[in-house]
Structures are given as structure tokens and as C-alpha cells.
Amino acid sequence: MASVRQEHGEEDGRHGSEITSPLLEPSAPPLASPEEWEENSPVEQVALTVPVGDDPETPVLTFRMWVLGAASCAALSFLNAFFGYRKEPLTITAVSAQIAVLPAGRLMAAALPERAFFRGRPWEFTLNPGPFNVKEHVLITIFANAGAGTVFGANVVTSVRVFYGQHMSFFVALLIIFTSQVLGFGWAGIFRRYLVEPAAMWWPSNLVQVSIFRALHEKEPRKKGSLTRNQFFLVAFICSFAYYIFPGYLFQMLTSLSWICWMFPNSVIAQQLGSGLHGLGIGAIGLDWSSISSYLGSPLASPWFATANIAAGFFIVMYIITPINYWFNVYKARNFPVYSDGLYTVTGQKYNISSIMDSQFHFDTNAYEKNGPLYISTFFAFSYGLGFACLTATISHVLLFHGSEIWQLSKSAFQEKKMDIHTKLMRRYKQVPEWWFICILVASVAITIFTCEYYIEQLQLPWWGVLLACAIAIFYTLPIGIIKATTNQAPGLNIITEYIMGYLYPGRPIANICFKVYGYAGPCQAQEFLQDFKLGHYMKIPPRTMFMAQVAGTLIAGFVYLGTTWWLMATIPDMCNTELLPADSPWTCPYDHVFYDASVIWGLIGPRRIFGDLGTYSAVNWFFLGGAIAPLLVWFAHKAFPAQKWILHVNVPVLIGATSLMPPGTAVNYTTWILIAFLSGYVVYKHRRDWWERHNYLLSGALDAGLAFMAVLLYLCLGLENKTLNWWGNDLDGCPLASCPTAKGITVHGCPVHN
């Protein structure tokens, strides 16, 4: 991935072609000077979207902020925990809270008394400091973002209680969630100067929220024959809200229109090729925004070069490598579905995991030898190989293309480097001291070690495992953060953490998933905090105020998320058990199934018996070497052909990791996402720049918000009463044979036998 300077040309020759002034002149004093305007962000999307003015006297840490921020954080935590267990996981983003709190904030500004309490004293405050302002609104949204993120510790709770059927107390579960979430604060504090202050680290998805803030708060005259940005947002929101009743309830097949299956209803091969949910998804298209944005995020927020890398990676893996492996029966591929995250015997039957565990919840070697080796689909095995390659490619890529920048920043040369206007304006506020983050980091590590040692019978993870997980997290947070901050995509650490712990401590599945959570959730949570810091950076929120809101939001989110998970497990019979649930039940838990399967592969059986010298898939380890070499080839190509600027847009970690979310992501989640991202990021951005500038990010936010509100309404009105529509339009995908094997003599219930 090229740096922004490389992407747009050298800085000295850029001003003639790139917009460097703000989209709208700031209206609140003090204004940025004309000289500072010239130092606007070198990233054109940021210069087009983010305002450059600031009023440091604007009240931010208000009573309204605390009330609305805490309420929206709790609401989003509940909704995301609730919808995260459903067949098509729905993420309710902070955009929904961003819209919902505006009328509430203005109502509070109109109704609350303005009288000051403790007047003349240091702790003087008022419930109503004046009109509801944009900075309050931004901080409420940052507060709410804590509830919009994933709480990875909940996957441990679900795996232990639901899949393994073991005991775990609520208190232990709460400790796991709190410690894993708070660890991210430490990593975020250490890497702020690398991932927030530099203009090149622009965090694309933040521009969606910035656009909405401007549309909701800036007054804009309506031109004849056109809509203001606020009006456009409202129209798009209403349309999204009204439309989602079709894919959400009335016509659920819109999630994946796999027309090849309809043409060949009795052909296993045709359905394997055409199914958008269980096959290669050739020709499949989804007309459901929740399906389009559920795994890769909003396609409207993806930079074009990142979209191109994802499209290339997806096409190579899904339409070249996977068919070749399957039809040549690599690793007995035809004994299993072409696309699956299941665990199988050699005859294509579901593997009985409970039969290879002893009474102490440890791996039973004799039982495993009796049952035979565990197999996975060739696609699933290959996806692990790509995960290996992505990890080494991330390190290699960042060192080659960003090594000099990191070295300069490490030597504190950042103070002398030219800053953009946003970093200059933020220097007037008190920064969060690094020792705050370090204290939180040390305390959270200490509490984590105590939790794992004291409750070792439930968690299995020893103290040295916690320290090793933290070492992996701190090593990878910076390179992954750079890729996330510039491409809106990020490779995960889940595979390397599983791999390492599986070798060091085999036969203990809960130790493996706890190790994964501490090694993986920390950097992920750090990315969320850093992204919020960048949003506050763009909107000029005092850093210490942001820090307070993030800490409070994280604690509220963890408690509500776990409470919701606990309630669902207690009230939904056979939750996550796809064999016992009714066919139309939404409670299939796709994320948790992948998490559980990984715990069996890496934790219970161990990588040595799967990917090591005792396993079937040992050749997959060569992907580590391939991933390390691939960025070097791109770097050599750039040096050999410096005039070919497109070479710098080849981001190997993003390209290799394009399908890292498959499974549980499916083909249709990618095909439609790539199409819309291409239309937005290339066609409209290139040929209708004025429309893209005003409407692109607003449209993204409106689609998210409309979907979220209708999804909640459908559940409250129909889901609670278990009212469903049974007709062919609600038969998701319509490809019942796509998950069938094609090897001769393999018999699977509901599938034809090939002779």
C-alpha cells in the first residue's frame, strides 16, 4: 500500500491539481488563517470533507453528553449483542445513535433549566450550557462507538457455555470481557503519535460521520432544483428504512439472488457454482444493505485502490484457486462442501467433538486415533494459509513502504515535520499523558494475570500465556493500524495467536481461545480507540475529554453486552445449535461457530495434528514464506518501473487478506460490495466529483441508519411474537444442494449420491 504522498505525487508538485481548501468556510471563530488553509490535509477525500475551523470555548463535557452518551452506548451494546447471534449478523453502527440523539439533545437544550450550581466555585456547572452543539454531538457519538464495536470476550463465553457445555460464572465472564477490552487502551496510547497525528493516517470510515455532522449542524441554503445535504440525508434515510422491510421480512431472498440455482434445481455442481451463501457465488447478487456491509463495512467508505486490491484477491481465491483445488480433489476436497467452515470425518460426516474430550475437558489421544483425523473443507484450509501469508506480508509491507517514516517518528522527528491544519489546531488542547495509558495497561495486565491464575480451572490459561499474548499484540498493533488507517481494512491476529498457543499448550481449547482474545482483541480494540481519536481530531474535541468518554463507554458496553448474551443463552432453546434449531430460526450464531471450530482445530486437537508433521495440511505452512516475499516483489517492481504509478497501489496484505473474513463471510457479501465500491470509489468519484463530495458519505450513513431502525422495529413488532412468512421468497439463497459433496460413494443426508 502506497503512502498518501506516493499515491498523489510528491508534495511540492501537488497543489496545482488537488483541492486543498475546506469544502465550506468555517463559521465559528477563531478561524484558520489563509496560510493554515494551505496546510490542509494532503489526502483529497479529507480536504473535501473535514472543516478546518475551531472554537475552543464550545462546551463539550456537559450533562447532556453524559446522559445521551451513556444511553446510546448501552442501547448499541444491547442491539449489537442481540443481532450478532443471528444468521445474517447485523451491526448497528454509531451512525444510528448519531442521528437519534440529535432531537433528544435539542429537546434537552430547550427543556433543562439554565441555572448554574455552585456558582463562583471551581466545580460550578449547569445542566444546560446553551444550544446543543456539534462537539457535544461528536463526543456522544464517540461514547456510543464503544457500544458499536465487537466485544470479543463474549465469544469465549458462548463457546464454553453453549458449544462445550461447560460451567462459567457470570463474574469470570465479566472479568474476561473487561480485561480484554481495556487492554486496547494501552496499545492505543503508545501508538497515538504514529496513527492519529500524521495526516497520512486518515481513517476513511470517519469521513462518513464527519459528513453527517456537517449535514446536521451546518446551515446550507437550498439551491433551486436541488436538495440540501440535510434533506438528501433525510430522503435516503426514509428510503433505506422503508426498503429494508423486504429483505428483512417480506422477501428475504433479496439477501442473495442466486439465479444459477433456479435454472438448475437438481444440479449439485451448478448450485456449488451459483450459490451466494454456500458456494462460489458466480452471478449472485445481494439487494440487502445488511448483507453488503455486514463483513467488509460500507463499500461507500472504501478508497478505490483498497477496493481494487480486495476485488483482485477475492477473484483469485474464489474463482481460480478454489475451483482448481476442488476439481483436482486436493486434500479430498470433493468429500466435503466446496465452501464450509464445518469439521468433518474423512467420509464427509460431521465430526463428533465431544467424543475426543476426556472428563477433565482435555484432548483424548486414544479417542482421536479411534475416530480418525479431523478434516476441513479445502477452502477453509486455504483460508488459514492466506491468514498465515497475510501476517508475514503485513510486517514485510510496512517495513518496505513505511519503515523510514516509522523510524523518523520513533526518533521524535515528528515535531519538526510539516503538520496539517488539524494537528496544528489540536495542539492548543491538553494532550492525554502517556503515563495514563501505561497505568491502565499495567493494571489491566495485572488483573488479567490474576483472573487467569485464580480461575485456571475454568480458563486454563497460565500467567505466561497472558504476557505472550500482550507481546504479540504490541508487536502487531502498529503495522495493522497503518493498514487500517489508510485502506479501511485490517488483517487480524486471530490465526497467529491460535497457532502459537496451539503448539505451546495443546489439548486445552479454552486456554487457546482466551489467548486469542487477549492477543487479538487488544489490537482490535486499540484500532477502535485510535479511530475515535482521529474522529475527535478532525472535529477538534479535547483529547482528555475523549479519553474519559471512551473509558466510560468501554465499561458500560462490556457489562451490557455480557448481560444481553447471558439473557439470550438462558431464553432461546438450542441457541447456536443448527442441527436442533428450526430451519427458519435466525439464531444460528455464524461468528461463534467459526470461533468454536477454531478452538477445536487449534486448541483441542492442536496445530501439530492439523498443520504440523502429524497433520494432513502441513504444506499450508509455506504460506508464511510466500507472504513475506510477496511485498518484496512489489517493491522491486516499483524500483524497476518507477513510472508505473499503479504498482504503488498494490497493497499485498489487503490483497492476500481480502477473503480473511470468509468464513463466516460468503461470496455474495463480496460480489455486491465490490460492485458498489467500484461505482462509488471510481466511477462517481472520477466522473461526478461534485456529487460524490456532497452525497457519498451521507448516503452511506443514511443506508446504515435506515436499516438499523427498521431491523429493530421488525424484531420488536414481529420477532418477539415469532411471526414469520413461509413462502419461496423467504427461502434464503434457494440452493439446497450447494453444500453437498461430489465424491463418489460419499453419502450425506439430503444430498444425491454420486456413483
Image: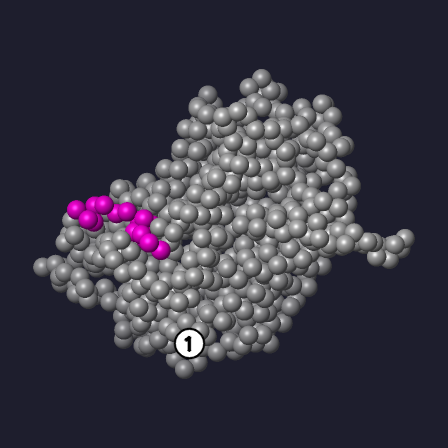
User: Which residue in the rendered view is the most extreme toward the top?
Assistant: 16
Judged by its main secondary structure, the magenta piece is helix
Above or below, 220 against 735 in this view is: above
* Camera-nearest residue between 611 and 587: 587
- List the residue tagged with mark 1: 165
At x 63%, y 52%, the residue is 104
360 and 119: which one is in front?
119
Does residue 727 belong to the magenta stretch?
A: no
- The answer to whether residue 255 is magenta is yes
Indicate left or right for 387 with 202 as reference: left
Of the 4 image quadrants, the one containing the C terminus is bottom left
**663 on left or right of 199:** left
Name which residue lies at 26% across and 42% down.
283
Residue drawn at (33%, 45%) of the image = 286
Quarter of the image where one finds residue 222: top right
Q: Name the element at disc 1.
A: loop
Magenta residues, start to end: 249-263
Residue 9 appears in which quarter of the rendering?
A: top right
Residue at the (60%, 53%) spot, across then down: 144
